[in-house]
Image: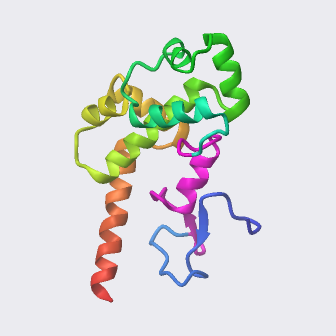
Amino acid sequence: QPAGRQQGQRNCEQEGETPPANCDQGTHDTPIEPGGPVFLERLRGWGPMPGEATQHPDLRALQVWIMENPAEDLRNEVLAERVAMSPRNFARVFVRETGVTPARYLEQCRLERAIRMIEDTSEPMETLARESGFHSAEHLRRASMRNLGITPQAYRERFQSACHHEISQRKET
């Protein structure tokens, strides 16, 4: 990271871009862009990405099942039963194998699902929160703020803005 720059900042003048009006000396905050380096870097700070499976075969199968069924009843007891372990042993093994608690991993999977839905649909937040496994849009908002530092609605607005900008640039070339 160059001196004087913080994570999530870039020098647009050096990258050949026209700086925005609020840009200070060519250095400004980079919006969180889906699939972009800041977004992925932020997600990587969580620990294993939901798509990164452990080497433990039972847990690997469970991770896949969690990603495919984020709205199911995924309490620790239910997950432990799926891999034929006691809840206490399951929690210990899961943390040892993945580096995060089952609850943290579950929130990551649900948030990743919600983000994909925000990017791909115009469904109301309440609907995609439920389909992602959150109890409500407020639970989704809290998880998003805790993990990404941005609300789902603000993320949608930035994503849509970035998409419109990219589309208009493609039309110009």
Position in image of residue 2 (x %, y %): 74, 69
Q: Residue at x 48, y 15 (%)?
A: 78
Q: Kindly give the residue lying farthest to the right in the view shown.
A: 3
The image quarter containing residue 139 is: top left
Task: Please name whichever residue, 6 or 103, is drawn nearer the observer in this view of the structure.
Answer: 103
Q: Is residue 172 left or right of residue 115?
A: left
Please tell me whether residue 81 belongs to the stretch shown in magenta.
Answer: no
Q: Kindly give the residue lying farthest to the bottom in the view shown.
A: 173
Q: Kindly give the residue lying farthest to the left in the view shown.
A: 123
The image quarter containing residue 130 is: top left
- Colour scheme in the image? rainbow
Task: Please name whichever residue, 54 or 48, is drawn nearer the observer in this view of the structure.
Answer: 54
Position in image of residue 95 (x %, y %): 69, 27
Which quarter shows the N terminus? Answer: bottom right
Position in image of residue 85 (x %, y %): 61, 14
Task: Please name whichever residue, 146 or 46, is drawn nearer the observer in this view of the structure.
Answer: 46
- Most common SS among magenta residues: loop
- Magenta range is 24-51
- The answer to whether one can see residue 151 in this image is no
Position in image of residue 25 (x %, y %): 60, 74
Number of callouts in the render? Answer: 0
Which quarter shows the C terminus? Answer: bottom left
- The answer to whether one can see residue 123 in this image is yes
- Seen in the picture, residue 142 relative to 29 is either above or below; the reply is above
Q: Residue at x 35, y 22 (%)?
A: 135
Task: Please name whichever residue, 150 or 123, is drawn nearer the observer in this view of the structure.
Answer: 123
- Seen in the picture, residue 143 relative to 31 is either above or below; the reply is above
Q: Residue at x 59, y 45 (%)?
A: 52
Q: Is residue 4 left or right of residue 38?
A: right
- Seen in the picture, residue 76 relative to 27 is either above or below; the reply is above
